[in-house]
């Protein structure tokens, strides 16, 4: 699952306290928390971090009012916010990020950064969700692109990885199921059965983040190609186009009463080419471990960035808010 919304909300366009250079993670000086690791940071890291800060401050932040205005107009064209397309200005921001060489920084093969070096970049992006989108570093696409880069065939990379890296499409990761503890993937019950030169998929998935947004074009689905043999060699991952016949998105699930882009999906006799299997049958656990390791770091660092922004807002308010005759 992903904590990244389909599109940032209005409150995220105009946060109560925007990041500023006085904040540790957002300033030009190396944050105190990174000082113990300074000898492990390469010149490449300092170069990229400076480019990211410049892009966020001079390109993304000035564009936020336009982003919000375009999103507001697009919301009038759909019957639910989860179906709202991306504001057009996002394509301009992506182009500028690409020109600066700062798209897809989460992927070591692209960024030439270690996971340690990307972590504080992720913290900066957690403070600015629009920059995160513009730089193509949002979940669940990040994990899916890592899977395709490391385990995909050349054909799969051409069809799906390239447009994902270019920000032309989005994706979703279909693993969680109702009725079982899906954090233990041995419980997964969705069936992936070989039928000639195709696989037939039957199952029920839910909390599939990003599946409803119109830009989502493909799922990486985890299911079972075998229900016998070694417990951790029964699972496989397979690419499923969202528009494949039999893919039925039932509803958007709610969080605290608010419907978000987390889908409840039925896969009913969905047929895909046998070439859509990733790495081979029984390799699902192997792929999952490769996907989840960096993903945990990415989520944590973005959350730390959001927490730092929230703390800065509290501090700012405490210095300006007057009650009972004095400043808080």
Image (spheres, rainbow, N blue to C red):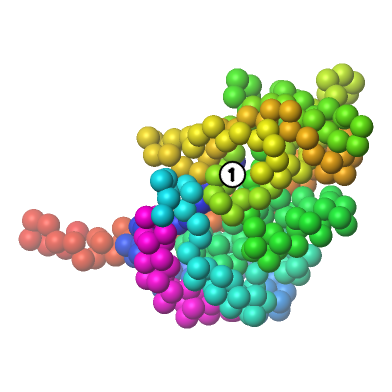
Identify the image quadrant of residue 309.
Answer: bottom left
The answer to whether residue 35 is left or right of residue 287 is left
Q: Is residue 226 above or below residue 104?
A: above
Residue 53 makes an appearance in the image: no
Q: Quadrant of the N terminus?
A: top right
Question: Does residue 73 belong to the magenta stretch?
Answer: yes
The residue segment tinted magenta is: 48-76
Q: Residue at x 74, y 28 (%)?
A: 269
Q: Residue at x 61, y 50 (%)?
A: 216
Question: Does residue 61 belong to the magenta stretch?
Answer: yes
Identify the image quadrant of residue 240.
Answer: top right
Identify the image quadrant of residue 64.
Answer: bottom left
**Quick one: 225 or 32, which is closer to the camera?**
225
Q: Is residue 23 above or below residue 100?
A: above
Which element is circle 1 on?
loop
**Quick one: 17 or 182, which is closer to the camera?**
182
Pointer 1: what residue? Answer: 211
Farthest residue toward the right?
Answer: 196
Q: Residue at x 65, y 75 (%)?
A: 98
Residue 168 makes an appearance in the image: yes
């Amino acid at each position: 699952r992903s904590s990244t919304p389909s599109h940032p909300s209005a409150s995220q366009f105009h946060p109560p306290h925007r990041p500023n250079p006085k904040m540790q993670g957002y300033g030009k000086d190396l944050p105190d928390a990174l000082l113990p690791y300074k000898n492990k940071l390469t010149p490449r890291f300092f170069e990229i971090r400076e480019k990211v800060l410049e892009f966020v401050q001079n390109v993304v932040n000035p564009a936020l009012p336009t982003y919000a205005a375009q999103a507001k107009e697009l919301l009038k064209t759909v019957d639910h916010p989860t179906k709202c397309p991306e504001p057009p200005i996002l394509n301009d921001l992506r182009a500028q990020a690409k020109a600066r060489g700062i798209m897809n920084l989460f992927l070591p093969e692209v960024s030439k950064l270690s996971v340690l070096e990307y972590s504080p970049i992720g913290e900066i992006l957690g403070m600015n969700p629009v920059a995160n989108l513009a730089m193509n570093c949002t979940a669940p696409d990040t994990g899916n692109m890592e899977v395709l880069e490391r385990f995909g065939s050349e054909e799969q990379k051409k069809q799906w990885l390239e447009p994902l890296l270019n920000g032309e499409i989005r994706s979703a990761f279909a693993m969680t199921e109702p009725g079982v503890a899906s954090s233990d993937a041995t419980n997964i019950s969705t069936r992936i059965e070989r039928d000639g030169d195709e696989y037939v998929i039957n199952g029920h998935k839910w909390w599939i983040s990003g599946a409803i947004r119109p830009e989502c074009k493909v799922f990486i689905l985890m299911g079972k190609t075998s229900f016998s043999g070694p417990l951790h060699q029964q699972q496989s991952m397979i690419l499923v186009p969202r528009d494949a016949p039999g893919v039925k998105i039932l509803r958007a699930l709610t969080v605290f009463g608010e419907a978000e882009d987390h889908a409840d999906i039925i896969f009913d006799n969905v047929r895909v080419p046998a070439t859509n299997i990733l790495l081979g049958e029984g390799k699902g656990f192997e792929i999952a471990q490769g996907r989840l390791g960096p993903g945990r770091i990415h989520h944590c660092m973005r959350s730390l960035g959001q927490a730092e922004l929230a703390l800065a807002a509290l501090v700012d308010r405490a210095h300006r808010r007057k009650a009972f005759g004095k400043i808080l």
